Image (tube, rainbow, N blue to C red):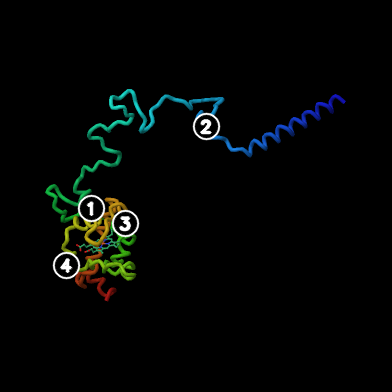
Amino acid sequence: MKDRFWLKLAAKLTFVILTVGLIAGCFRGEPKEEPPIHLNPNMFKQPKYKAQSESEFFPDGATMRQPVPGTVAADSLRKDNAYYSGRDENDSLLAKMPVPVTMQLLKRGRERFNIYCAPCHGQTGDGQGIMVQRGYLPPPSYHQDRLRNMADGYIFDVITNGVRNMPSYRHQVPVADRWAIVSYLRALQRSQNASINDIPPELRESVK
Ligand code: HEC
């Protein structure tokens, strides 16, 4: 008999608690100024300065400090000016690219060229890319003496800064890839301006 009494009481209590919990769950918490109560605060609260916050320590009252003069952000040291600008110490465009041309570089250049340049300039550099076929202003063909005789640094500069109607590709194409594209563009020009005498005699038959 006594057992049943406690059992009933426990059942009633459970019911009440569940109901109250259920109803309470329907109400949204009000925004509060107070931080939530942490029963186990761990290291939630630490004295520290946050960005843009006020400081009583520094005379100018700001927490944030200017970097020490001469500070260079990681990976931002541009010591080799020719490599990063395509120009020599007199600010003239480099006649020859400052990195050795390897098969690997050419392949990278071909890949990047076909992504970033071919849409306008065409895969052979004739200036008839898909954009032009759909109405974009046609760029000049690379296969003319004026552009064949341009300095390597000029092509680098065109990619970096754009030229007249061509936009800059400095954000899409990092410096190393620009040189790779320059090497490939030179190869393209060579390929479209070759005679049968450029081919070793034993291979001439195969291309006729
Ligand atoms: C959105 C189309 C477009 C893309 C993409 C493009 N170009 Fe051009 N490019 C042009 C146009 C248009 C011109 C002609 C600019 C003018 O003379 O007004 C041009 C001109 C050039 C010239 C000749 C500049 C001169 O002196 O006549 C070079 C070299 C060149 N682009 C290289 C590149 C390279 C390398 C890429 C890839 C990184 C590239 N372009 C991507 C549109 C493009």
Q: Would the CB of label 4 be found within 8 Å of ligand 1?
A: no
Residue 90 in the image: x percent, y percent?
Answer: 12, 49
CA gap, disc 2 to disc 4?
74 Å
Provide the residue designation for mark 3. Answer: 108
Left or right: 129, with 154 as reference point:
right
Q: Which mark is residue 32?
A: 2
Position of the C terminus, as image quadrant, is: bottom left
Q: Tags 1 and 2 in contact by the CB under 8 Å rule?
A: no
Dot 4 or dot 3, earlier in sequence: 3
Ligand 1's image quarter is bottom left
Dot 1 or dot 3, earlier in sequence: 1
- Residue 79, quarter of picture: top left
**In the figure, 20 relative to 203: above or below?**
above
Position of the N terminus, as image quadrant, is: top right
Dot 4 or dot 1, earlier in sequence: 1
Q: Would the CB of label 2 be found within 8 Å of ligand 1?
A: no
CA gap, disc 4 to disc 3?
26 Å
Residue positioned 75% across, 30% down in the render: 13
